[in-house]
Structures are given as structure tokens and as C-alpha cells.
Image (cartoon, rainbow, N blue to C red):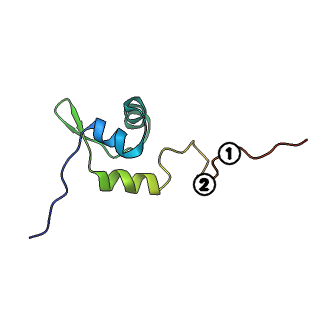
């Protein structure tokens, strides 16, 4: 029998991504964030969230992550 992935809440997703819950709510409202409504509640599958991140979700429009943690040096 295959193990089925469970559903998690917004606090779990925020902790998984190390972001504030407000960020998750904003992404759900403005982007194709993989959320499922169960009545008034939002539920998520972490595998769908991880796939969304890998596909560039959460990045500013028209940009992709470069892996850079500090800004590039400007002209001197």
C-alpha cells in the first residue's frame, strides 16, 4: 500500500519555507500558489509547495533566483 501524503495547514507551510504566514496568504491571493480550500480553511501538500518553489514561485515577476545572497557591487 502506497503511503499517502497528508494535508498541512498554513503555519506548517510557513515554517517549511521559513517565511511569515502573511507571505503565504499573499501568495495564495496573488499567485498560483498550490492551496486547497476546505470550507474556510486553507490546506496544502508540501510536495506541491516544493514543486511551486522549484518552478520559480515566490520570485518577483520577471526574475529568477540566482542563488546570490548579497547584492551585486555597483559602480565605484
Q: Position of residue 43 (x, y in %)?
A: 23, 41
* Residue in front for this viewpoint, 36 or 45: 45
Q: Is residue 29 above or below residue 3?
A: above
- Number of numbered tags placed on the structure image: 2
Which quadrant would residue 25 be assigned to in this image?
top left
User: What residue sits 41% from the left and 52% below the top?
Assistant: 52
Q: Is residue 41 left or right of residue 51?
A: left
Pointer 2 local density, CA inside 10 Å: few below 14, some 14–19, many at least 20:
few
Whether residue 32 is visible to the viewer of this picture, yes or no, is no
Residue furthest out toward the bottom: 1
**Tag 1 secondary structure:** loop
Q: Which mark is residue 70?
A: 1
Residue furthest out toward the right: 76
**Residue carrying label 2:** 67
User: What residue sits 54% from the left and 45% below the top?
Assistant: 59
**Tag 2 secondary structure:** loop
Which quadrant would residue 70 be assigned to in this image?
top right
Pointer 1 local density, CA inside 10 Å: few below 14, some 14–19, many at least 20:
few
* Residue in front for this viewpoint, 53 or 15: 15
User: What residue sits 43% from the left and 40% below the top?
Assistant: 31
Q: Is residue 4 left or right of residue 21?
A: left
**Could you give the CA–CA distance between mark 2 and mark 1, rounded to whole angstroms?**
9 Å
Whether residue 1 is visible to the viewer of this picture, yes or no, is yes
Amino acid at each position: 500500500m502506497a503511503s499517502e501524503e497528508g494535508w498541512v495547514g498554513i503555519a506548517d507551510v510557513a515554517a517549511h519555507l521559513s517565511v511569515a504566514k502573511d507571505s503565504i496568504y499573499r501568495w495564495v491571493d496573488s499567485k498560483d500558489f498550490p492551496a486547497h480550500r476546505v470550507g474556510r480553511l486553507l490546506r496544502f501538500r508540501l510536495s506541491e509547495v516544493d514543486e511551486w518553489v522549484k518552478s520559480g514561485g515566490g520570485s518577483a515577476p520577471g526574475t529568477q533566483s540566482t542563488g546570490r545572497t548579497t547584492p551585486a557591487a555597483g559602480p565605484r
